[in-house]
Amino acid sequence: MIIGLTGTMGAGKGEVASYLKEKGFEHHTYSEIIIEETEKRGLDATRENLQKVGNLLREEHGDEGILSRKILEKIKTDKAVADGVRNSAEIRELRKAKDFYLIGVDAPQKLRFNRLKKRGRAGDPDSFEEFKRLDDKENLGRKGQEISKCLKMADFMIINDGSLTELRKKVDNLLKNITC
């Protein structure tokens, strides 16, 4: 089984992925593939550079699903999670794999901003206005980022508006539905 995770910035995709890892899922991120390529090109791994390099990879290979193919090549077990799908062509490529399910993760915008502030990751926006600008840009499908479109393609949705315990229960229930 391969689970793809898509969702808005700060919604909790990383928490879902971490929980799936605890449950024995092999974990791969689109970011790890793009970071490797960004570093090969001598660039800093900023959000902006990662987006640019991801788009360049697709252009250079003439292939919108190149990142998903690179993830599929890395998978070594029968349970894996592909974390951070942000492009509909990547989803179409993953759907070619047997037993693939796409999970969308979302939460209210203000809650997501507060989570980003708490995690303190380099490159995260400092103000709600900057967060909203970046969030809107990613969600509207500009520059290779198609979060809204990806969420519409999800087989299952998780609204992560509660505690970590509640999120884990939602993941457990979802896994029961998939394996039934």
Image (cartoon, rainbow, N blue to C red):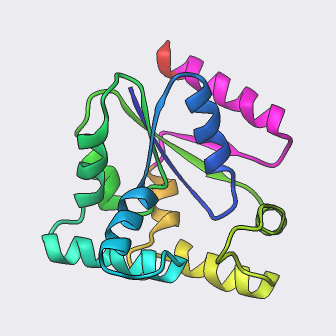
Is residue 56 left or right of 138 when viewed as pictured?
left
Residue at screen point 42% across, 32% down = 80
Residue 54 image point, x, y percent: 34, 72
Residue at screen point 32% across, 76% down = 55
Quadrant of the drawing holding the N terminus? top left
Residue 136 image point, x, y percent: 61, 79
Q: Nearer the viewer, residue 13 or 71?
A: 71
Q: Is residue 148 above or below residue 29?
A: below
Residue 25 image point, x, y percent: 49, 28
Magenta residues, start to end: 154-177
Residue at screen point 64% across, 78% down = 123
Q: Is residue 175 above or below residue 143?
A: above
Specify the quadrant of the image occupied by residue 108: bottom right
Specify the quadrant of the image occupied by residue 85: bottom left
Q: Is residue 160 magenta?
A: yes
Is residue 41 left or right of 149 when viewed as pictured?
left
Residue at far left of view: 62
Counting every numbered tag in the picture gives 0
Q: Is residue 174 magenta?
A: yes
